[in-house]
Amino acid sequence: MLLSLGLSVAVDVAAVGLLAWVTWHTAKDRSPPNAVPFALMTSSLLLWALLSLISEFPNAWGVGSNLAAIAQVVPVVFLPAMWLVYVLGYIGRETGFTSLRGALFVLLALPLIGAAATFEGDPTREEIRRSLASLVGTELFLLFIIYVYAAFLFLRYGWNHGRVSRTQVGIQLGAISAPYIIGGWLDGSLIIDGVTGGLLVSGVLLAVAVQRYPVLTGFPKADYVARSRVVESLQEAVVVVDWEANILDANVTAEGLFGWATRDVIGTPLNVAVDGFDGIDLSAGTTEVVSLQTTKGRRQFQYTVSDVERHAGDSDEEPVAWTIVFRDVTDQRTREQRLSVLNRVLRHNVRNKLDVILAHADHVEDDTHRTVIQNSASELASVSRKAREAEAVMTDSVSAPSTVNIAAVAHEVAATARDDYPDSSISVTAPERLQLTSYRTVVRRLMTELVENAIVHSDDPARVDIEVETTTDEIPQLRIADNGSGIPDRERELLTESNETQLEHGLGVGLWFVNWAVSQLGAELEFQSTGTTGTTVIVRFHRNSESMRQDSDGSHSR
């Protein structure tokens, strides 16, 4: 008798120890997507093992031991539900509490409540027996349905999945089934109780599982999430990785680019499958350029990382995966570098050579030739200066935007233009303040170019009207009207196009800057004819939450 009790207690203690270690190992880091459901599942087994251990001492602990034996029904009933929640999370479904799952737990608790209610009043022994038999049968049926459904899902998603070992599937199924199967197979007349042995088997199997297999991250969910979110026909390479940066899925473009088949690299660390991707930041929202080895040689890629949520729009929950999109920017960056070098060399050489030309032009005796040389050189120097200024201004737009009072900018531009063109008439109609979040240097230069272009191409005396306002849709708007011949139709077309070719280079640097600035600011450009003479240029800025207007007008005319 003592030997049997000693062995049974030893097995219970071993089961409690193993299950406690598994629960602690899982709960200490709850960041993996399925750590919490797994910990709740192992906690149910741990509670069952503790109650089983306490129930081994009916003589020593009396009522407490008997209550522990009865209380074992709680983990017995709720363990299959915990198992189902874990499986749903593992295959990519919701892991948190939902109304449906709450209803499931209530449904499982109803037979227990009914069993307790059976003893109310003064029922006969036969009434109690029939009621309990009916309630127990209902409870067992519910448990069986839940367990089988969860096991079916687990087998369906995991048995033929490249990332999940069939041994893992068998171990986890065995760990959940052992207390029920062994408990029903072995009766209490043996040295070791069947439930006690089953809990020990569960502890051993779960300890092996958490050490050797990815039981917390959930890999079959790629079938549920990745394929529904990743468009196979994308021209960019797309790779889906899990919490530990192991590959879950990839599209055909990625396969051709990196020279492997998706089925062969599932579960492989990304930095192993993609040469050159070691030590790269995979935080959601990251956009960087990296050099990677491909089937076409080493190429430069801009990669963007975004997280995949279980439910679209729920940013508070843990992502189930991360999607990395690779876009080949080798040719683009080479072209940008080439243009940057050529631009720098030409600017330096043009500036130096023009200084030499202008210095020697004074020594030309023929007034006509001297004037032509000086005017041409001065115009070329002006173009070079504008190109430098345009590049400097556009470079500023890579920094963070700030709040810009475009009404104040309009007054500043008008004041500068009056100093540069004293014979012109420039008026400003604007509220005291009209703000938007933008780039002040770009906005100011845009206004300057439009005002200068209006003055230069206006009839004498030049008249330019600057108006800053908001539309009926509360969109900030700039209107610059002149009394000149206006911008030719072909130049207007070029301003709305994005390509500059040798056959279509009618715009000067200033108007090209207008084109670039409008695009950079996300604005819209429109031209309107003003009667028989004159043109009105309209710039509609991008509306944002910072845009505001004060009604007091502060107009200035000259």
Image: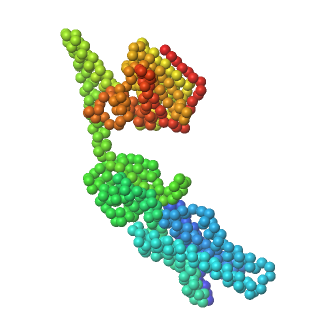
Q: Position of residue 138 (x, y in %)?
A: 64, 79
- Say which of 542 and 103 sits in front: 542
- Say which of 190 and 233 sits in front: 233
Q: Would you place residue 446 above or below residue 40 in this image? A: above
- Say which of 173 and 129 sits in front: 129
Q: Quadrant of residue 180?
A: bottom right
Q: Would you place residue 499 above or below residue 254 in this image? A: above
Q: Quadrant of residue 98?
A: bottom right
Image point (45%, 35%), residue name: 523
Residue 394 horizontal side relative to residue 119, left or right: left
Q: Would you place residue 270 above or below residue 43 in this image? A: above
Residue 385 horizontal side relative to residue 187, left or right: left
Q: Quadrant of the N terminus?
A: bottom right
Residue 19 horizontal side relative to residue 303, left or right: right
Residue 231 horizontal side relative to residue 404, left or right: left
Q: Position of residue 535 (x, y in %)?
A: 42, 24
Image point (51%, 74%), residue name: 151
Image point (47%, 75%), residue name: 171
Q: Quadrant of residue 368?
A: top left
Q: Please say whether residue 29 is visible from this viewpoint.
A: no
Residue sticking out furthest to the front: 532
